[in-house]
Image: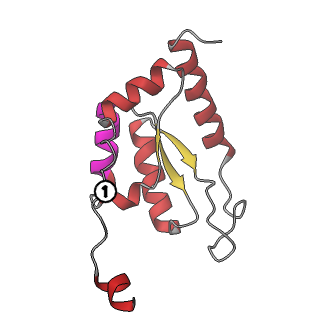
Amino acid sequence: VFFFFFKTPPPPTTPPPPPPPPKGASRRVHAAGGFCSLAHPVYYGVSTDAVLDLLCSIGIEAVEAFHGGHTDAYRDEVWQAAVKRGLAVTAGSDHHGPEHHPRPGHRPVPLADVHGAIKRLREAHQAAGRP
């Protein structure tokens, strides 16, 4: 049983359908009256400038700079690059359990950035003809 369980390859599965391309996804979100924010920009393996330039080219309005997993230096890098491009800055609130630090609510977010994100959401709602 041990050999079978650990040495036998898993049965083939049907792969999930591919996600829509980013530009198509952002169009769908905008049509619904929302705005798009890229979470975890550090995980794409390219420079912050390259990620944010792509975001701007496909109509994404915001980027997550405040996240418990970001160093202060990386947060500041993303924040400054976003402001330079007119992107709103968002904060991640996801939490994966008590073993992960810091816990939610332990990273301050400047109120001006919260207001900027709310303004972008209102603009997106108005552009989609929503109240």
Where in the figure is residue 29, as x and y percent of width and height?
47, 27
| Disc 1, SS | loop
Q: From the viewer's perspective, is residue 65 above or below residue 73?
A: above
Q: From the viewer's perspective, is residue 2 above or below residue 65?
A: below
The residue shown at (53%, 44%) is: 89
The residue shown at (48%, 51%) is: 79
Name the quarter where the C terminus is drawn. Answer: top right
Magenta residues: mostly which secondary structure?
helix
Q: Nearer the viewer, residue 32 or 61?
A: 32
Residue at far right of view = 105
**Where is mark 1, residue-wise?**
13
Residue at far top of view = 129
Residue 23 drawn in magenta? no
Question: In the displayed structure, does residue 69 sit left or right of residue 11?
Answer: right
Q: Nearer the viewer, residue 34 or 122?
A: 34
Mark 1 crowd level (few <14, some 14–19, many ≥20, 10 Å Cα): few
Q: How many marks?
A: 1
Where in the figure is residue 46, as x and y percent of width and height?
27, 58
Residue 57 drawn in magenta? yes
Q: Nearer the viewer, residue 27 or 52?
A: 27
Question: In the displayed structure, does residue 90 sit left or right of residue 12?
Answer: right
Question: In the displayed structure, does residue 11 sit left or right of residue 118?
Answer: left
- How was the colour assigned to the protein in this rendering? secondary structure
The residue shown at (27%, 49%) is: 50
The residue shown at (61%, 65%) is: 96
- Residue 123, quarter of picture: top right
Name the quarter where the N terminus is drawn. Answer: bottom left
Part of the protein shown in magenta: 49-59
Residue at far bottom of view = 2
Q: From the viewer's perspective, is residue 30 above or below residue 131?
A: below
Identify which amino acid the numbered label 1 is placed on.
Answer: Thr
Where in the figure is residue 107, as x and y percent of width and height?
66, 62
